[in-house]
Image (cartoon, helix red, strand yellow):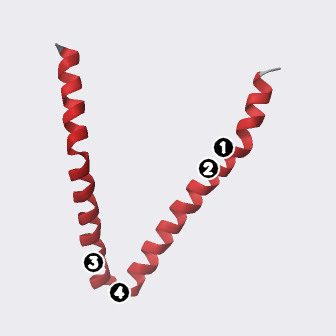
């Protein structure tokens, strides 16, 4: 019974996922507009710099993964 309850909770949370994503995006838009009203162009600069930082971080992680994965596999075979 306990596993069925956990599975039911997981399925319920998966069903709510599109709604939660939509609510998260709308909340982000609201906070962005409030920030623009309060701080003006500096809020936009801050937001762009944060998104750029995230993209650079993810890009660097992907490049490192692609570069080092073959070396790790090669070491494992010796």
Q: What residue appears at the point 47 percent right and 74 percent down from the top-left corner? A: 48
User: Which labelled disc corresponds to residue 40?
Assistant: 4
**What residue is shown with label 1?**
65
Q: Is residue 48 left or right of residue 72?
A: left
Above or below, comparing residue 59 to residue 70 in the picture: below
Task: Determine the CA span between mark 3 and mark 1.
Answer: 37 Å
Task: Tell how many labels.
Answer: 4
The quarter in which the N terminus is drawn is: top left
Q: Position of residue 53 (x, y in %)?
A: 54, 64
Name the N-terminal-most of marks 2 and 4: 4
Nearer mark to the viewer, of 2 and 4: 2
- Near mark 1 (Cα within 10 A), the count class, few <14, some 14-19 or many ≥20, is few
Quick one: 62 or 34, which is closer to the camera? 62
User: Which labelled disc corresponds to residue 31?
Assistant: none
- The secondary structure type at the circle numbered 4 is loop
- Near mark 3 (Cα within 10 A), the count class, few <14, some 14-19 or many ≥20, is some
Name the N-terminal-most of marks 3 and 4: 3
- Near mark 4 (Cα within 10 A), the count class, few <14, some 14-19 or many ≥20, is few
Q: Is residue 9 left or right of residue 70?
A: left
Task: Determine the CA span between mark 4 and mark 1.
Answer: 38 Å
Name the N-terminal-most of marks 4 and 1: 4
Task: Determine the CA span between mark 1 and mark 2.
Answer: 6 Å
Name the N-terminal-most of marks 2 and 3: 3
Above or below, comparing residue 36 to residue 16 in the picture: below
Q: What residue appears at the point 69 percent right and 45 percent down from the top-left corner? A: 66
The quarter in which the C terminus is drawn is: top right
Q: Is residue 10 left or right of residue 70?
A: left
Quick one: 57 or 1, which is closer to the camera? 1
**What residue is shown with label 2?**
61
User: Which labelled disc corresponds to residue 33?
Assistant: 3
Nearer mark to the viewer, of 3 and 1: 1
């Amino acid at each position: 019974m306990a596993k069925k309850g956990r599975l039911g909770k997981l399925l319920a949370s998966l069903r709510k996922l599109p709604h939660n994503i939509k609510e998260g995006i709308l909340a982000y838009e609201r906070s962005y507009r409030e920030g623009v009203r309060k701080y003006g162009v500096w809020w936009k600069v801050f937001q762009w710099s944060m998104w750029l930082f995230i993209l650079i971080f993810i890009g660097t992680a992907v490049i490192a993964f692609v570069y080092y994965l073959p070396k790790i596999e090669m070491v494992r075979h010796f």
